[in-house]
Image (tube, rainbow, N blue to C red):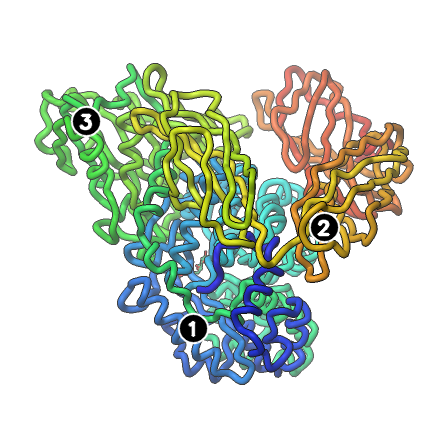
Amino acid sequence: MRRSAITFAATCALVAATLTVARPALAAVPYEDPSLPVATRVEDLLSRMTLDEKIGQMTQAERASITPAEVTQYKIGSILSGGGSAPSPNTATGWADMVDRFQNGALATPLRIPLIYGSDAVHGHNNLAGATIFPHNIGLGATRDPALVQQVGAATAEEVQGSGVDWTFSPCLCVARNDRWGRTYESFGEKPELPVQMATIIDGYQGKGVLATAKHYVGDGGTTGGVDQGDTQLSEAELRAVHLPPFTEAVRRNVASVMVSYSSWNGQKLHGNDYLITTVLKGELGFKGFVVSDWNGIDQIEGGTGFTASEVRRAVNAGIDMVMVPTEWKSFITTLRAEVQAGRVTTARIDDANRRILTKKFEYGLFEKPLADRTFTPTVGSAAHRAVARQAVRESQVLLKNTGNVLPLAKNGGRYFVAGKSADNIGNQSGGWTISWQGASGQTTTGTTILQGIRAAAPGSTVQYNATGAGIDGSYTAAIAVIGETPYAEGQGDRPGSLGLDATDLQALNTLKASGVPVVVVLVSGRPLDIAAQLPDWRALLAAWLPGTEGAGVADVLFGDHNPSGKLPVTWMQTASQEPINDGDGKTPLFPFGFGLTYTGTVESPGQPGTPVASAVTSTSATLTWTAPASGSTPTGYRVYRDSTLLTTVTGLSYQLTGLTPGTTTRYTVVAVDAAGRTGSASAAVTVTTPGTVESPGQPGTPVVSAVTSTSATLTWTAPTSGSTPTGYRVYRDSTLLTTVTGLSYQLTGLTPGTTTRYTVVAVDAAGRTGPASAAATVTTPGGTDPTATCAVTYTASEWGGGGFGGAVTIRNTGGTPLSAWTLAFTFPGNQRVTQGWSATWSQTGAAVTARNESWNGALPAGGTVSIGFNGSYTGTNPRPTAFTVNGATCTVS
Ligand code: BGC
Ligand code: BGC
């Protein structure tokens, strides 16, 4: 498809204007006129739609169960490819042709509403043969590199676009709390912070015009026993503290869709839960996209086979906007129509679902460019994308043991014996959701196996291979055993029993051990395994997770081309009986969360360069300059990337960009390279916006703060000195829009005494185009008690034993006035320490603890509550704090 590389939110107006030029005077009706605001187009279209057309928009069928003619007849809004469901031939062009056939079916309806095509591109475009397969999320979580993960999303999106697909059912923002769960590898990690950080992948997808899906809402990774589609038995405070934050972050990043989880919360299926879908997600979090159900997910609400009318009604009334009914879509349409006609589903609900779906179809340009944009087709499996994947693989490797510095291995003069069922196996190293739903062992797609990577890395050494270890003798420098799990997906990967190695692996290990050669284990698995009994036999252990098609990234670490930098995204059990085991729960792990060794001594990679600065920006050129890394080996050059595409390698600290397109926004990062070809992590990105024929307003002057009282202040600023003429200014507190004013000042009221807040302004012109934000002004109000704060606090401590405990605090605003910022303060009566906190910025001085709101939960409406939590430790006893204040005001406590 369709859209070009754009930073979406900022440039909707720009896109609309460009498209007007591309398609002049074609619009016969307002909704087809791209110069009108999206909301106007949606209302116009909605006013022309029949009930059947609206129900069609809410229906998603599977490609193998529908024809293009049926798309026309039933006015279908969406089609998906299930896991492994691909056209023949399974090539990018084969896909684009198929999607276009369905799309032409949609365009043959009276209102010509384009359909939206979705597929699970969960680690690259994994249903497409020959696509670049990236590490599964657990490996990406180990990188701790959100900028790289965003590049992974951008590269994936290009391959998705190149095959005509509009929408990926990714990322899984699950917080996997029990390694027995078969979807643990789809999780970025066991603590909410990791999926929150790695939500940058949404910007990677959506910045390239592919809709993302945050899934599975909510609590999928928290089921009792780690049972897939099971029951998450948690208090609301725990659910909010552990499983909700990644979705809050996804909404903040304007994720286009959210998929509902198959799982239940305290016995109730999420697919029928209007409180969590409508009240919390759409209401409290302010989600503006559309909610899609999971594959036949509505069937499970009441538990019988297939769906009933009451399940359809429950699901739609709970707030599901698009229903994934892969095969039974005709009966879904009939059932929902009857429910609406009987008044059991309101037309208001149907209209709301349609508004949400149509808004995204307009925003993503589907009405203007419904057919596949084949510009990206040649990028599928390209060298540039495989380079991004290899970088992700090297950064995801976690070195867990390295006795006597057996690693890195020497490239020259070594004699290496490689064994193990996953050494030469693209299918095993890619895992589930690869070409087929469950994935499979063997040569399932194109790539580099770990063995091939080893051979390429050590041309000056002897590399002997036998999967079982047969033929090894004492003459080798080291044996490399590449072992672990074979592919699985969803519930088929649940392991309620043993989490140990299989008989094949144990046998190969025994053969290697008997030779007396030092054994290096590369563990290819979707989760930590129960290996404590074998570990003493191993000199080194590298957790490779499920790296995907670029096995050379594993060899990069084995041979020291990359100094291992991955850190455990999950806690590693001593024995399976410890499951669930998570950071802070007081259990003693084999390796703790965050653990990961590096090589000391000579093998060092360059550090991260400073964020590039763009200067001398003209409509076609700009200069980027950056600073050298503060640590690591000495760089001999810098690779400059536009998104994930390598532009050039330079030796200095600047680069002149030329040939830019006027009026566009592009994104650049730099990576340092040393004399040995080792690379460090990418710098943060800089965005370059060139002035174009379509001019936006310039940057307003930095706001000046005056007349500061404990609850109010005045901001004044100057108009931009360049660009189109502003007709108004948007005033932001952090990233929250407060208001739009027409003049050059704004009076802030309702501030919290004794707090510091940050403001920027953005100029908007008559066409709705916005310029860059001003520099920020900081307002610090004099302290005192906030007269508007009236509060009630609940405090619950859960004991873990051994002096560890978890604290859950809920703050309710019991006053009649909304709070726009809050700070909770209390004093520990005993010898307690907060070791880690979430959903607030926690700090402790002596016994005094404060928790200050995050940007996303600072607004506390009258009657509203916010739940936060922390992990703590203590010596002696653990008495409860008795007094709590919010913004200085004393709260009631229960
Ligand atoms: C999975 C989802 C997936 C959907 C479509 C379901 O079984 O739970 O994660 O997006 O199928 O393939
Ligand atoms: C589909 C998957 C889906 C699964 C659900 C499979 O047949 O291919 O996409 O997630 O069924 O059970």
Three-letter amino acid code at the position of disc 3 = Ala
Q: Is residue 522 left or right of residue 512?
A: right
Residue at mark 3 to residue at mark 2: CA–CA distance: 63 Å
Q: Is residue 576 left or right of residue 758?
A: left
Picture coordinates of residue 800 (x, y %)? 58, 28
Query: Which residue is disc 2 drawn over?
Result: 763
- Residue 8's image quarter? bottom right
Residue at mark 3 to residue at mark 1: CA–CA distance: 50 Å
In the picture, the quarter occupied by the N terminus is bottom left
Q: Nearer the viewer, mark 3 or mark 1?
A: 3
**Quarter of the picture for ligand 2?**
bottom left
Q: Nearer the viewer, mark 3 or mark 2?
A: 2
Front-most of 554 and 363? Answer: 363
Classed neighbour count for the residue bearing mark 2: other residues with Cα under 10 Å, few (<14), some (14–19), many (≥20):
many
Query: Which residue is disc 3 drawn over?
Result: 479
User: Residues at badges 3 and 1 in contact (C-beta under 8 Å)?
Assistant: no
Q: Residue at x 62, y 78 (%)?
A: 339
Three-letter amino acid code at the position of disc 1 = Thr
Depicted 424 relative to depicted 606: above or below: below
Depicted 211 relative to depicted 452: above or below: below
Classed neighbour count for the residue bearing mark 3: other residues with Cα under 10 Å, few (<14), some (14–19), many (≥20):
many
